[in-house]
Image: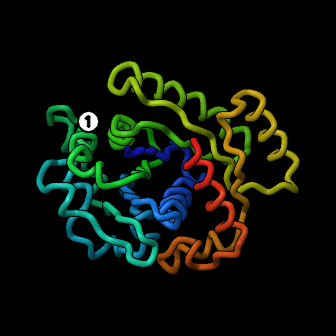
Amino acid sequence: MVKILAITNQKGGVGKTTTSVNLAASLAATEKKVLLIDLDPQANATMGSGTNKLTVKQTVYQVLLGEISIESVRVKNLQAKYDLIPSNRELAGAEVEMVTLTKRETRLKTELSQIESEYHYIIIDCPPALNLLTLNGLCAAHAVMIPMQCEYYALEGLSDLVNTIKKVRAKFNPKLRIEGLLRTMFDPRNILAQQVSDQLQQHFGNKVYRTVIPRNVRLAEAPGFGIPVLYHDRQSKGAQAYLELAKEVLNV
């Protein structure tokens, strides 16, 4: 049975897309069939998967507007062994165009029902905003992963996101749950980061993933080559951390 995981945080720069791309690659490396959906107009997950956002013709934008089927948009990442639903800047206008459409909150969910049985995992990279695109991701998902840096501003934003997830659960998707909080860009030498990490574990307990994603040069380099870090430097701390995260996700 497929598991659909939305990776979201309304705060930008927390490692959301890095997590989406590298978790997809790490799950695919365990022989699981994986689909990665780029719901962000910045299209960083598309570029990080080796697809050029400037030249791709068919994207999730046309799918959400009902112009083409989701099957026709899939791009196979032959190296990283997962499929991709790409994005580009056109997606920024989708919110305005979707306002007049029926069932605008669940259009992605409806489209995914056509192909979800082909996969073990579907990962949705949501934009850094609590908007209609993110709402589509949350309505389609079974669970939510929240990447966050260990800083105090992150804790403030977390309450807004949790409240949004509660509203989506009440109105659109009663099965939606928070699977876990992922500590990203973690520097163990930083006392503040350690303190915030301790607070997260005290408040959320087993909802905090055991795996911690470190600050890592190889993780930062990999998108420039259009590949997940697993295929840039498998022995790096970043690659090993995402392989460990994949094991946790598999065991949930």
- Height in image: 159 above or below 121? above
Q: Residue at x 19, y 32 (%)?
A: 103
Q: Give left or right: position of 113 versus 246.
A: left
SS state under label 1: helix
- Height in image: 213 above or below 216? above
Query: How far across and down, in percent of the image, does residue 233 sit?
Result: 64, 78
Query: How far across and down, in percent of the image, does residue 39 sit?
Result: 36, 52
Q: Residue at x 36, y 36 (%)?
A: 135
Q: Name, please, the residue furthest toward the top.
A: 170
Query: How far across and down, in percent of the image, does residue 131 sit?
Result: 38, 38
Q: Residue at x 44, y 64 (%)?
A: 44
Location of residue 87 by image quarter: bottom left
Q: Give left or right: position of 172 versus 203.
A: left
Give the labeled residue for mark 1: 106
The N terminus lies in which quarter of the figure? Answer: top left
Local packing at callout 1 (Cα closer than 10 Å; few below 14, some 14-19, many 20+) is many
